[in-house]
Image (cartoon, rainbow, N blue to C red):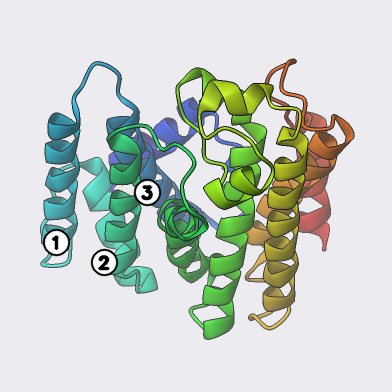
Amino acid sequence: MSQADTQYVTALVKRSGTSFYHGMKILPPARRDAMYAIYAFCRVVDDIADEEGRDFTAKQAALNEWRARIAALYRGGTDGPITRALHAAVHEYGLRAEDFLAIIDGMEMDAGAPIIAPSLAELDLYCDRVASAVGRLSVRVFGDSSAAADEVAHALGRGLQLTNILRDVGEDAERGRLYLPRELLAQAGIPLTPEAALAAPALPQVCAQLADMAEKNFARAEAAMARCRPGTMRPARLMAASYRPLLGILRRLHFNYAKGRIKLPKWRKLVLAARLLMA
């Protein structure tokens, strides 16, 4: 990877303001640059899915272009700083094409009509594509491609994405989206529309159930990390430590979204990073 390509993907990560920046920053330079390349790819395809004023057909065409770029990448072809940076990461860390394609598939789920009250199975597939697939790429860059590392990716990705969903219920409803599963909503007698669900008295009950699911995934990820190569899962631990406390904050607020999105204070994230660096 050239210095210019490294600078390009690094700048993209910094501009994004991702909460995972500190988790990637603690990696050795070569692994950090590979993670920046993966994140840059994720950022670009996510921006395609979220672009306002662009219809589904146009978004799908743009995502198909990235499917073609990934296919070309595994034949040795590159066409810009992101694919050049990915090319280096793919060959250095044995990254799998299927995981990049799964991420694109997840973005395509978001590119069409708004997701509203998906089934539990559809929600799980969505979490796997947009989060756990990223994890399967990440653990290889971290230094472990074992079955235990893939289990970390499977569980941690779901824990992180379910936490994202719970944090953003209010914002998503304003955009006409509702990622809470229809089975849980139906059991609580909550209408399957974003605006009505947000106003439903039983909403905290459903959110608490989804938070329980997230907690179980964080616990499974933590158990799997203990079976991985020593030291390799430090960035994954930081990601979990940056997100898992949000569930406690949401519970204390009784999943009241009137005050907008909650977040972990930046100082706390820095303290967590420092602890992991010294561990």
Real-space Cα separation, disc 2 to disc 3, in angstroms = 14 Å
Image quarter of residue 170? top right
Residue type at numbered disc 2: Ala
Q: Is residue 35 above or below residue 108?
A: below
Q: What residue do we see at 80% from left, 47% from top?
A: 272
The foreground one among 117 and 231 is 117
- In this rendering, the label closer to the viewer, 3 or 1: 1
Mark 2 neighbour class, 10 Å CA radius: few under 14, some 14 to 19, many 20 or more:
some
Is disc 3 placed on a helix, strand or loop? helix
Q: Earlier in the sequence, mark 2 or mark 1?
A: 1
The foreground one among 195 and 66 is 195
x and y, in percent, of residue 6 in the image: 36, 43
Tag shown at residue 37: 3
The foreground one among 77 and 224 is 224
> In the image, is 270 to the left or to the right of 187?
right
Report which residue position mark 2 lands on: 97
Residue 238 visible in the picture: no
Disc 2 + disc 1, Cβ < 8 Å: yes
> In the image, is 181 to the left or to the right of 125?
right
Q: Earlier in the sequence, mark 3 or mark 1?
A: 3
> In the image, is 91 to the left or to the right of 158?
left
Disc 2 + disc 3, Cβ < 8 Å: no
The foreground one among 201 and 166 is 201
Mark 1 neighbour class, 10 Å CA radius: few under 14, some 14 to 19, many 20 or more:
some
Residue type at numbered disc 3: Ala
Is disc 1 placed on a helix, strand or loop? helix
x and y, in percent, of residue 123 in the image: 48, 53
Report which residue position mark 1 lands on: 71
Residue type at numbered disc 1: Ala
